[in-house]
Amino acid sequence: QVQLVESGGGLVQAGGSLRLACAASGGIFSTYGIGWFRQAPGKEREFVAGINWNGGSTLHADSVKGRFTISRDNRKNTAYLQMNSLKPEDTAVYYCARSTTQWVVAAVREYVYWGQGTQVTVSS
């Protein structure tokens, strides 16, 4: 059973940066795509960024393009989300997930293993 644990969330001022990490254990990590999602209160969970199995292909939502960067280190079974130029509207619980495929996918239904989430709060 794959377990994913997010870390790195916190409170930051607008314009600041955070780096989220997603550590995987208990299963195969290196041959599957990884995604980051977020969910704000009263809103649906939304795709933020995805990366394929070897890090050679990435996809970022338009709302974060140019500010956030997804990456992975298969030697450490860890994925990352570097978040720069944070805005108050980035405030949400951020989740990482492992997909059912080796490719980059954005749909929530393509992900079967989820972490517990980490809170990111951006103050204005």
Image (cartoon, rainbow, N blue to C red):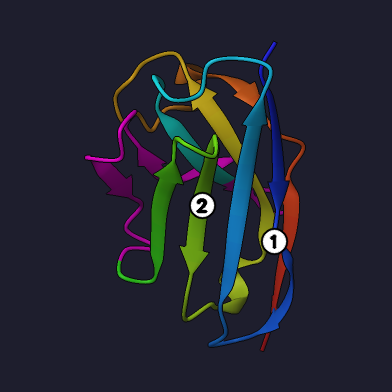
Q: Is residue 42 left or right of residue 15?
A: right
- Is 44 contained in the magenta span? yes
Tell me which amino acid carries mark 2: Tyr
Based on the picture, tell me whether residue 20 belongs to the magenta stretch. no
Q: Quadrant of residue 44?
A: top right
Rendered location of residue 36, percent (x, y): 52, 43
Q: Is residue 71 left or right of residue 2?
A: left
Residue extending farthest to the front is: 75
Q: Which residues are magenta?
A: 38-65
Residue 7 image offset from top left, x and y in percent: 72, 53
**Residue 8 marker:** 1
Residue matched to label 2: 80
Mark 1 residue crowding within 10 angstroms, few (<14) / some (14–19) / many (20+): some
Residue 77 or 89: which is nearer the viewer? 77
Q: Write the residue at 67% across / 25% down.
A: 25
Camera-side residue of 38 and 116: 116
